[in-house]
Image: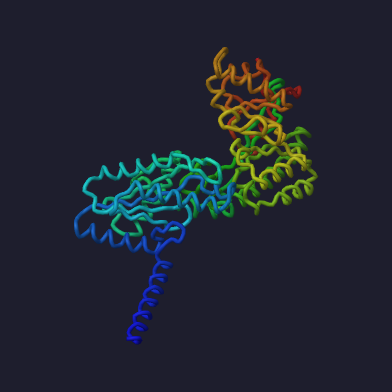
Amino acid sequence: MVRRVAMSSDITEQRRAEEIIHRQANVDPLTGLPNRRLFLDRLQRAIGKSRRGHQKLALMFLDLDHFKDINDTLGHDVGDRLLEETTHRLMACIRETDTLARPGGDEFTLIMGELQDLNSIDRVAQAILRTMTAPFKLKDELCYISISIGIALYPDDADSVEDLLKNADQAMYAAKKLGRGRFCYFTPAMQEAAEIRLRLTNDLRHALADQQIWVAYQPIVDLATGEIRKAEALIRWEHPTRGRVNPAEFIPIAEDTGLITEIGSWVFHQVAEQVAVWRHRHSAQFQISINKSPAQFHNNSDKLGDWFEHLQRLGLPGGCIAVEITEGLLLDASNTVTEKLLAFKNAGMQTSLDDFGTGYSSLSYLKKYQIDFLKIDQAFVSGLTAHSTDMALCEAIIMLAHVLGMKVIAEGVETEVQRDLLMQAGCDYGQGYLFSKPVTAANFEKLFSSTRADGGPRFQQR
C-alpha cells in the first residue's frame, strides 16, 4: 500500500513538472496568453482545418499605438499592467473559438477560424477599437492608448503561415500610416509597396558610394531688399533606373534603417564646404539651412562634435549654418534632443522651426529653445489674398515671432501678390518658385551672378 502511494506521488510530481515545462514553453507569463511558439502551432492547425473544410480564416495583427511612451514615462511596471488590462479587454471582444496570443512586446495576434460570415471580422475589429477608447487607470493616472489592426484572410490573401503573417503585418503598418486607431485589410497593393520599399532600401545603401545623392539649394530672399541672403539645402536622389526619387519616399526609409545618420553627415560636409565658397565670393554673412530629422536627434551615434570640428577646420563660424527642425521634435523633446539643441546654440548655429502653424507645439517651446526663425508653411501662403483668413494668420505669426525676437521666413511664395502682401505684413524672408526652384550649386551661382551691373539685388520689388 505504501509503495502504491509513493508511485502515485511520483507520477503526480512528474505531471506537475511537465505542465510547468509546457507552460513555460508555450504561454506568455505576463498575460497567460499563448506565446509566439504556441500561436504559430495554433495558426498552422487552423489553416489545415480551414483547408479541409473549405472555409475562410482571418488573422489579425494588433499593435498598441505609442506603447513605448507609456514605458518611458510611467515605467515598465505600468506598461505591464497596461498589457494585462488590454488582454482582458480583447478577450471580452472575441469568440470562444478564436485564439488570442501575445507573440511579444506590445503585439497581439488573433486567429478567427471557421468563418461562416465575413462580416464577423468587422464586428470584432470594431469592438476591439471601441473597448480601447476607454481610459486606462494606471498609477493613479488616466491614460489613453489606441490600437492598430491589420487583417489578412486565408486563402484569399495567402495560403501559408509565412505569407499570412507577412500580409497581416503589412496591413497593420498601413493602419498605422493612416493615423492609427483603426483596422486595415491586406491588399495586393500593400505587397507591391513593400517590395518597392525593400528594393529602395537596398539601393539606398549604395546611393552615396555610387554618387547618386546630391544637394540642391533654394534661395531665401530678404523681402525688403530682394537680396539672396540665405539658402536651404535639400537632398536629392537620382536613381539610375527610377530617375528622381521623391525625398518623401526615401527619407523615411533612411530614418527607419539608420542610414539617415550617414547621409546627414555627408550632406553637412557638402553644405559646409559650399557655404565657405559663397561666403568668400558673395557675402560674408551668407547662411545655409540644413534639415535635421527627429531620427537624427534621437540617434546617439550622430556625433555633433564632428560637425563643429569640420567648421573649425574650414575657418567657419557656427552662424554659417542654420538647423531646421519640426514642431513634432519639440513636443517629443527628450534629454538627448534638448542637449543637442543646446549644443547647436553653444556652437553659434541658429535654429529654424519648419512648417510653423501646422503642428501643435507650445509657445513656451519657442522661448525655451531660443528658436531664431519661424517658417510659415506654404499651406498658408498658397491661398494668400488681402483680408483673407490666411492673411490674418500670417500677420499673427509674424507679429508673434517679432515680439519673441525671431525672424520669419515664408515658404511657397509663387506670385508677386503673395510677396507684396507678406512684405506689407512685415515678413522678413521669402522662399519659393517666384524666386527659384531648388537648383544645383552651379545654377545657384548664376543667381548671384545675374545681379545688376551696379551690384543691385537680383530679385527687385515692384
In the rendered view, would you say 445 is above or below 385?
A: below
Residue 213: % across, % down: 58, 47
Q: Is residue 327 left or right of residue 33?
A: right
Q: Which residue is drawn at 54% across and 54% down?
A: 205
Residue 65's spot in the image, x, y percent? 48, 45
Position of 314 with respect to 121 (left or right) is: right
Q: Is residue 48 visible?
A: yes
Let me know if residue 192 appears in the view.
no
Classify 311 as above or below 387: below
- Count all numbered tags in the image, as a single digit: 0
Q: Is residue 72 left or right of residue 32?
A: right
Residue 135, image x, y percentages: 47, 40
How are the residues colored? Answer: rainbow
Give coordinates of residue 290: x percent, y percent: 65, 40
The residue sitting at the front extreme is 1
- Quadrant containing the N terminus is bottom left
Q: Measuring 74% from the left and 34% from the top, which residue is drawn there? A: 286
Between 262 and 305, the one nearer to me in the picture: 305
Q: Toward which corner of the image does residue 422 lie, by quadrant? A: top right
Quarter of the rendering occupied by the C terminus: top right
User: Of all residues shown, which one is farthest toward the left?
Assistant: 53
